[in-house]
Image (cartoon, coloured by chain):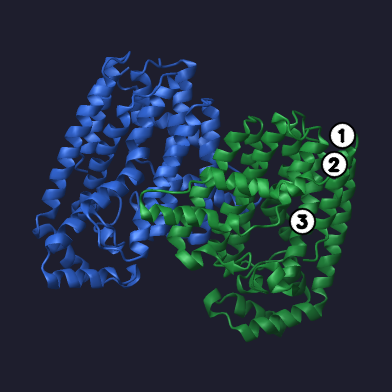
Chain colours: A green, B blue
Amino acid sequence: MLYTARSMRPELTDRIRHLLPAHSDRPEVNLLYRMMRDYPERGGKGIRSELLLLSAQAHGVQVGTPAWESALWLATTLELFQNWVLIHDDIADDSEERRGQPALHRTYGVPLALNAGDALHAYMWAALLQAGVPDAAPEILTMIHRTAEGQHVDLAWVEHREWNLQPSDYLEMVRLKTAYYTVVIPLRLGAVVAGRVPDARFEEAGVALGAAFQIRDDVLNLTGDAQSYGKEIAGDLLEGKRTLMVLDWLTCAAAEQREVFLHEMNRPRSEKRPDVIRQLLAWLLESGSVTRAQRTADELATRGLTLLTEALSGLPDPLAAGTIVTVAQGLANRHA
Amino acid sequence: MLYTARSMRPELTDRIRHLLPAHSDRPEVNLLYRMMRDYPERGGKGIRSELLLLSAQAHGVQVGTPAWESALWLATTLELFQNWVLIHDDIADDSEERRGQPALHRTYGVPLALNAGDALHAYMWAALLQAGVPDAAPEILTMIHRTAEGQHVDLAWVEHREWNLQPSDYLEMVRLKTAYYTVVIPLRLGAVVAGRVPDARFEEAGVALGAAFQIRDDVLNLTGDAQSYGKEIAGDLLEGKRTLMVLDWLTCAAAEQREVFLHEMNRPRSEKRPDVIRQLLAWLLESGSVTRAQRTADELATRGLTLLTEALSGLPDPLAAGTIVTVAQGLANRHA
């Protein structure tokens, strides 16, 4: 049964397809329905749903039982969460691309995309209701609350041109914005759907692994391959994101480089100049900041994996538990 | 007990205040918390929660019982729905004002306001969970689905510069965008919280009353008093809204007036010229379209009130049922 979680991906896509409305007699509404299906149909790595399904198995949920059916609906809930959040994130950051195609608001405009995200948010709750696991609702609420808080911190720094930040600020932001929805809550939901109390160590383990995951993601944003990454390269610089590399580089950059950087960051995204962005990227890469960020990610990954292994020991299905560690290792050390 | 529903307003505001988080150790997050409380603390008419609480009483829920407590949480849910939707609507329409103060995104920027709306959306579900009425969740889902569909239709007309529309298109849009969340679902939830099956006629009655309410609202937008209305007057013209008056006027306007109108409507909001908007407003008022729209609202109000009275007959609390009709009459015939 080791392959189950990953092989469930088409099953989850099918559930989303059946849950979302397909046809309206009002032609305009059909466009809304198409927009709601757009991001889910672009695919995605499905890391969160995979972790949840593996965690459910590790905690003793057997494939084919009603609890497994509930776990599949909870996994669908996480997929829908990811998709509505991405629609709204792309608006907030004015991102160009998502999963290799134009961001939704770039095709349909901000008002329609904003509304489609809200509609998808409601269907996320519909999926949760299908799961029929009352104790899952507080977990989902915690997940959205923390993610929205992290998103707020990230966006507030951009909005208020705040660059007086330490690496610890970045790690706190990422804890809220990424770790809960990527690792902590998927692991906890697996326990909840099995009728067990989640191990308290999932939180600390998930925070470390989530941070490692986000640092790798930020590195890929600067150095990755656009095609496999699915977004424009160095988009974070265009969006003025406070990444660990940038905060680290600012602490040791020469005064004139720092000045060029801050001047460019204070320009609106549409007025940022590609040649300056390329220069900034070159300085960042030369400075060793990327290497140091990778080292921080290594340390976080090691700590997270140790805690995770401890938290998972003694669970009913050690094979599934071992696979969780493998998957977590992959996401905390991803290179694409 | 007739005054209970309206006098419950401070109680609902208190529930929102206690449900929403107050303090974070992260200073940035405190700004998010303040933003979430902003619209709820500006007040509002509380029409939806009043209808819900009256409907609960009419269906036999006694004040002070656990069912009444549930009804209060459902009313809080409707208030939170209204508030997050308004934050996002104001972004989509780029509105200037809300309840007499600047729209949230005008003060904090679109990214932070968009995210605050999402955070408030999640707390709406937290309020629903507090109610502990499983059958209420499908009603809330229907409410959001229909409202988002109506919002999409409204925004798609603006986005796609669609003016080839009939009054029936307007009525269909308003049915989706306004009627469900303003009348149909509040009435139905009152039955649900009493453990009864909602009368099927609430739907048709609510659709007629909701449409009448929205037509009056659109008229007030053109002719009202800015202070009591709480938004800029003729904002709908600046936002290019397809109101019943405008669609009616377009069918009979002189060719050159029509041309001036369509030309102005195709300009972005920020480039619309106040003097031209004033001229358009004058033409609209002179044309008799406002009077005809009021007549349509009169007819809808009469039909809705007749259906509503029938649907409410024979309920356990005739006094509360009678008050619903009075409140519905007020909202379908509002002049401020």
**Is the residue at mark 2 from the same chain as the one at mark 1?**
yes
Q: Do the residues under discs 2 and 1 have CB atoms within 8 angstroms?
A: yes
Task: Using a 10 Å C-alpha cutoff, classify the residue at mark 2 as few (fewer than 14 neighbours), some (14 to 19) or many (20 or more).
Answer: many
Q: Residue at x 35, y 22 (%)?
A: B4
Does dot 1 land on a helix, a strand or a loop? Answer: loop
Q: How far apart are marks 2 and 1 (CA)?
A: 9 Å
Which residue position holds label 2? A320
Question: Cβ–Cβ below 8 Å for labels 3 and 2?
Answer: no
Residue A83 at x, y = what percent? 59, 53
Along the line of sight, the residue nearer the viewer: A190 or B111:
A190
* Number of numbered tags placed on the structure image: 3
Identify the subunit bearing mark 2: A
> Chain ID for label 1?
A
Give me the residue at 34% from left, 24% from top: B199
**Is A42 on the left or on the right of A194, as rendered?**
left
With respect to residue B113, does B302 lie above or below? above
Circle 2: residue type = Ala
In-image side of B204 versus A256 (left or right): left
Circle 2 — which element?
A: helix
- Residue at screen point 46% across, 15% down: B65
Name the element at disc 3.
helix
Q: Which of marks 2 and 1 is nearer the N terminus?
A: 1
Position of residue A244 in the picture relative to residue A135 (left or right): right
Question: Identity of the amino acid at label 3?
Answer: Ala
The residue tagged 1 is: A315
Q: Position of residue B106 (x, y in %)?
A: 43, 60
Residue type at numbered disc 1: Leu
**Residue A28 quadrant:** bottom left
